[in-house]
Image (cartoon, rainbow, N blue to C red):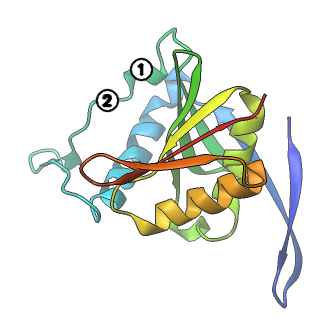
Amino acid sequence: MNIIYKIKKIMIGVVIINIKLAIASTKDKYILENMFQLYLHEISLYFPMNFNSLNGKYIHGGLEKYFDASENQAYFIKEINNIIGFILYVKSDNLNILQEIFILNNFKNQGFGEIAAVKMFNNKKGEWIIKSLPLSPGAERFWKKSISNYTNGNYEIEHTGKYERAVFTFKNK
């Protein structure tokens, strides 16, 4: 489903934003892998990431679980037909988990991430868990604003673990 959102920009007028989520296919896995490297580079600002100097890539657990037969899925966030980010979704014990979200820097702070998250929430009903990026005040602010807007403030937030990571929970049945 393709929904057109309108976002009012100060002194610019109304800008039409056409965001869609597209499931990443196996043939597109290399695109996700490339974008995931950008994501890992970005989050390395907040805590150390292992980097392989021999191949110039960050070391991670892999993206295979998003391409197997499970309910886990990788989505590209597209503005018109251009990929501007991704969402990694996991289904675990009847819980919907938005594992990761990433928007390319030149598309940040324009509402794309929140629109993509809302589309994801609307596609998957039930109980949700979102764990904010540890040690990132910006990520926590993003989720607090986005989830509050989506749920009209009907959500829980808990800070847990060694990094006091913000964990958001809500239901959208």
Query: Looking at this view, is 169 or 98 the one in front?
Result: 169
As displayed, is residue 92 above or below residue 33?
above
Q: Quadrant of the C terminus?
A: top right
Residue type at the position of mark 2: Gly
Q: Position of residue 11 (x, y in %)?
A: 84, 91
Residue 44, horizontal then vertical, whole percent:
27, 59
Above or below for 94 versus 51: above
The answer for how far apart the CA atoms under marks 2 and 1 are is 8 Å
Residue 43 appears in the figure? yes
Residue under label 1: 65
Residue farthest bottom in this picture:
11
Q: Counting other residues with Cα less than 10 Å from the Cα at mark 2, is it few (<14), some (14-19), or many (20 or more)? A: few
Residue topped by disc 2: 62
Identity of the amino acid at label 1? Lys
Q: Residue at x 31, y 29 (%)?
A: 62
> Residue at position x 75%, y 34% from top?
172
Residue 80 at least partly seen:
no
In this picture, is 59 found above or below 70?
A: below
Judge the density around disc 1: few (<14), some (14-19), many (≥20) Cα neighbours within 10 Å.
Answer: some
Nearer the observer, 96 or 111: 96
The quarter in which the N terminus is drawn is top right
Determine the secondary structure under disc 1: helix
